[in-house]
Amino acid sequence: MYEIEVRSAFEAAHFIEGYNGKCARLHGHNWEVVAVVRGENLDKLGMLIDFKILKAELNKVLEDLDHRYLNELETFAEENPTAENLARKIFESLAASKIFNGSTKLHAVKVQETPNSCVTYYE
């Protein structure tokens, strides 16, 4: 089994409605995102998946979040844009990409909100 990961980042603002603390106020983060792919079969070049292709797909997903006020996005109309919900939404969007096949699957998405706080979503 092989496991690869790519990293990217985006900047966005949000607040957590109903939270008792500073995060109830509007604030922003430089979010870092890691996409982890697993698989057993390498292609004819000896790659599980091309890093460049995976990173481009991740960046497409993050483009919709970059420099946005996350609470205003339709995707968060029913829930707070927490790091946990962001990780799941990013995972779902990236997993729907056509770059994955039966032997290569998105395994996890990690979202780092601060240098000391992160969440990982697994399906």
Image (tube, rainbow, N blue to C red):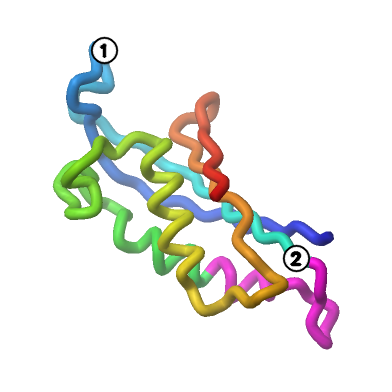
Between disc 2 and disc 1, the foreground one is: 2
In-image side of 96 versus 71 (left or right):
right
Front in this rendered view, residue 18 or 32: 18
Circle 1: residue type: Gly
Residue at which label 2 appears = 39
Residues packed near mark 2 inside 10 Å, few (<14), some (14 to 19) or many (20 plus): some
Residue visible at 19% across and 21% down in the picture: 18
Res 21 label: 1
Residue visible at 49% across and 45% down in the picture: 32
- Disc tally is 2
Q: Main secondary structure of the magenta part?
A: loop
Against 37, residue 108 (above or below) is above
Between the C-alphas of marks 2 and 1, the distance is: 42 Å
Front in this rendered view, residue 98 or 30: 98
Front in this rendered view, residue 86 or 9: 86
User: Please, which residue is most extreme toward the top here?
Assistant: 20
Against 70, residue 116 (above or below) is above
Q: Does 43 lie within the magenta span?
A: yes
In-image side of 84 versus 2 (left or right):
left
Circle 2: residue type: Gly
Tell me which segment is drawn in magenta.
40-55
Residue visible at 38% across and 52% down in the picture: 89
Report helix, strand or loop for mark 2. strand
Q: Does 29 lie within the magenta span?
A: no
Residue visible at 38% across and 44% down in the picture: 86
Front in this rendered view, residue 115 or 65: 65
> Looking at the picture, how far across and down is residue 29, in whole percent?
36, 36
The quadrant in which residue 113 appears is top left
